[in-house]
Image (tube, grey):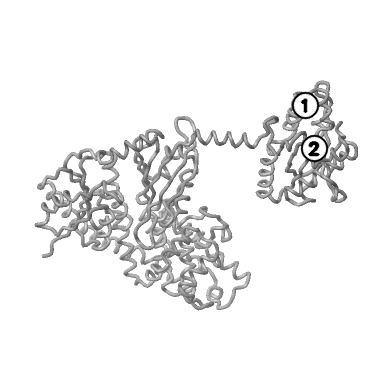
Amino acid sequence: MDKGKILIVDDSEMNRSILADMLEDEYEILEAEDGVDGLAMLRSHGSAISLVLLDIVMPRLDGFGVLAAMNQSGLIAEVPVIMISAESGSAQVAKAYDLGVSDFIARPFDALIVRRRVVNTLLLYAKQKRLTAMVEEQIRETERQSSLMIEILSHIVEFRNGESGQHILHVRTLTDFLLRALMRKTDRYGLTSQEISCISVGSALHDIGKIVIDEHILNKPGRLTVDECTVMKTHSIKGAMMLDALEGHKDDPLIRTAYEICRWHHERYDGQGYPDGLVGDDIPISAQVVALADVYDALTSPRVYKPPFSHEKAVEMITGGQCGVFNPLLLECLTENAESIRALLAESGEQSAARESRNIVQESVRPANSSVSDRTLRLLDYERMKYSFFAAMTREIQFEYTISPSVISMTPWGAQTLGLDEIIMDPGRDPKLQAVLGDDGWAEMLEKLRQTTAEAPNISYDCQLTYDGQSRWYQIILRSIWSTDMPPRFEGALGKAIDIHDTHEKMTYLEKKAARDAMTGLYNRAAAKERIETRMADRPQSNYAMAIFDLDFFKSANDQYGHQFGDQVLKVVADRLHRSVRGSDIACRAGGDEFLLFLEYNTDIERTVDRIFHSLCGPYENYDISVTMGVALAQLTGKSYEALFQAADAALYAAKRAGRAQYRFYDESLKDTLSAISDIDDEQGGTDQ
């Protein structure tokens, strides 16, 4: 009789040797010195390994990383794991059990306890496998009976529609596959295995409304007329009405799900579908997935109006938008698993039913819940004590995220600083984490992680975290974690948050100071130009005006009252300008006594300019302030900063030549006019005197 294989994964050769000596008489021993080598052996031997003895703290990949990978691949349901630890703490123990660990063995090793726990765990798994087989057979039989009437009804629809008898099976199989791929990719929808099964069964009724559609329309070999298309499109609502009319059953989860699928499986993600024009995730995920499965099988199957397309052509047409717009995440599931889908649809109906039954059983029978250690667990925190200590000393908030299960693990100092738990289950729904990150903070982090690749896993960005009643700026640095499979799968991330609030505030202050004129507090010319160009690029459809003005005879004010008085006049003009414009307008001191104003307007710009012009003029102490202004409209000059500036400058020159203390709008007659800001006063012999 062959010995069972036990894999010992521990970076300590001494520990591996001690455990091997205890167990080698009854079991074949395999050894791995870290998590990476351990996963390689697991992938090589698979379920031929009877049990894994797994250390927690190891180089390259620790025990939690191995458990996460086993969960991702499904091996955790086939191969029991006993964790090896010097000490134990509640947070780490809870995490290990959540990840599927069956038991713990503490160091130093006791030969009797090691052998007893290994035997107990193996016996438990043997019983569980027998139970799994029994439950699977019962579920398979129940599924067969419950699906029989649905399939009969669905095949009646197919028979009337002239479609292949495989269409319902293909849609159901592909629906189940895409939903499970979607759950591995994102936690946005949070479907259980039972809900996935319900959607898969309900998919068989997606076209039940075609029972009431005229057979001539259903089986017409050519293109349908507009009226015929209108009739055909009613099948989604009529099918939903049939299900809604099932008094006493319409609140059943299967009927509710089938209703969603019937009514909305022709909706499209961009709102261009029917019957209700739903957009995005307003369409139930059940209907979204069935819609994609239905289109794929329709393309790859023969119809009265077309031959079948190849698998490659069907995927190309779907991703190219020729069949409407689908959820981008579902399209990723389709393209990333294209070859698996081709093989999947080649399965027989019996094989497909068996696979679905196994999926349900694996969800309901979990080894993580089947065993509790019969001995008080000792502390587990010592192995990571130095790591936590140095993390606290650096004042960095360090954390780890795993996608399956969806868990964030934080260093004690980081959790205490932010007022969070060290272990956060289902972070997307954790209210305390949402309060720290903000409403969209978690979604933003996941989106940035999804933009990484195995080749370029690092990303950083700045954001505000809110805790202790205040918001502070942090730099978030992330490194995504990928499986060693080909192609690699995103499995989680390591990250840290660094407090940059003081630096950020100082940089913001310096940037504002660099952008402002020191005397007036208005923007300087360079900063104004940058903001004007950005505004016009961001909102090209808006109407814009630029005004340039300077003070009349300002040099005489300096000469008569002194430069300090002249500086005060500039401040008064800047204040009047600030008070007369909106917060969205851009006002700057262009240089000397020249000012620039940029306006976004809808109507009656002449009235606005007149109001601003007159608000600038008027007495200050014993000095009468007056200005001359030139105005240019972007609808005449084009949306270019340089063109607007030159046109407003030309209008200013013309207004000064006409006698000052007035404003003028630029028109084509001023096209060749000189600049007012380019030394006009020198050419006229100092007219400001």
Q: Is residue 296 visible?
A: yes
Q: Position of residue 574 (x, y in %)?
A: 74, 31
Which residue is found at the position 13% from the left and 58% from the top? 27
For residue 363, above or below residue 94: below
State which quadrant residue 248 falls in: bottom left
Report the amino acid beneath label 1: Gly
Q: Quadrant of the C terminus?
A: top right
* Residue hosting label 2: 549
Please, what secondary structure does the residue beneath circle 2 have?
strand
Residue 181's label in the rendered image is none
Q: Position of residue 550 (x, y in %)?
A: 80, 35
Query: Nearest the camera: 255 or 406?
Result: 406
State which quadrant residue 518 falls in: top right
Question: Contact, CB < 8 Å: mark 1 with mark 2?
Answer: no
Q: Quadrant of the N terminus?
A: bottom left
Is 194 positioned to the left or the right of 577 in the image?
left
Q: CA distance from mark 1 to mark 2?
A: 16 Å
* Residue hosting label 1: 566
Is 599 positioned to the left or the right of 411 in the image?
right
Query: Nearest the camera: 435 or 471?
Result: 471
Task: Classify 10 Å Cα crowding around label 1: few (below 14), some (14-19), many (20 and above).
Answer: some
Report the amino acid beneath label 2: Phe
